[in-house]
Amino acid sequence: MDAKNSIIKPFAQQALSDHVRAAPTPSAPRPSREEAEAAVRTLIAYAGDDAAREGVLDTPKRVIDAYEEIYEGYRACPAEVLDRTFSETGGYDDFVLVKDIAFNSHCEHHMMPFYGKAHVAYMPTDRVVGLSKLARLVDVYAHRLQTQEHLTSQVATAIEEILKPRGVAVMIEAEHMCMSIRGVNKAGAMTVTTHFSGAFRDDPNQLVRFMTLLRGK
């Protein structure tokens, strides 16, 4: 898709869900970096280690550096990710599928990682979005404290409200560390969540095609 054919169509901000139109607004002031590092030292001590020990002396700084990357989704706006679209599609009227989008997120219940692959498809109307933007959209929502169900719904809703396609299909497959390395200790168990709307929900043939392309049969 050539950038010279790109168009930017304004969308009605008031018509978008809160989580789509803007980055989240904290309900309380964000702690300072010094306060955050002090909290990490407290957790090290709670685990039973010596926060002043040489091996973990710089751990608070490293943890907060990692947090800046892991939770960068709190500073990103989904609407801006999907804002730039392309109008010249040569009459293309089938669905667009980007599959096997690798992602990682953190469970909001235990703050432990879950990771896997997202598969995203939509049926464009008069506008399509750059393929990398779909992967970026997944990352925006994944880089927040999440549940897999909520992540699936948010990705689908953002595409529905901004691109207004004829249908959206989102499937996420992930392994959750909160059940593979603690609790029931079931390593390798995969959780699958889906969201289908429009033509993917109403036309069984489109859903079968989507699943067939995912499974490669």
Image (tube, grey):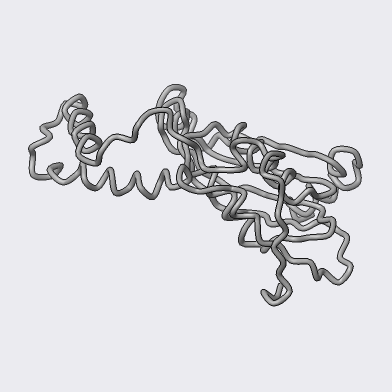
Instruction: Work out which quarter of the rendered image holds the N terminus and state it.
Output: bottom right
Which residue shows up at 21% across the image and 27% down it? 47
* Residue at (43, 47) in percent of width and height: 72
**From this viewpoint, which residue is outermost toward the top?**
183
Q: Is the residue 123 above or below the residue 54 in the image?
A: below
Name the foreground residue: 179 vs 125. Answer: 125
Location of residue 127 in the rendering, given as x and y in whole percent from the top left corner? 78, 60
Q: Which residue is more in the foreground, 33 or 167?
A: 33
Counting labels gives 0
Across and down, in percent, residue 63 comes to 27, 43
Position in image of residue 23 (x %, y %): 51, 42
| Residue sitting at x 47%, y 28% | 179
Q: Quadrant of residue 45?
A: top left
Percent coordinates x, y for residue 138 in the rendering? 58, 48
In the image, taking residue 209 as reference, residue 15 lies left or right, namely: left
Vertical position of residue 48 compared to residue 187: above or below: above
Residue at 70%, 76% in the rendered image: 2
Looking at the rendering, in which quadrant would you find the C terminus?
A: bottom right
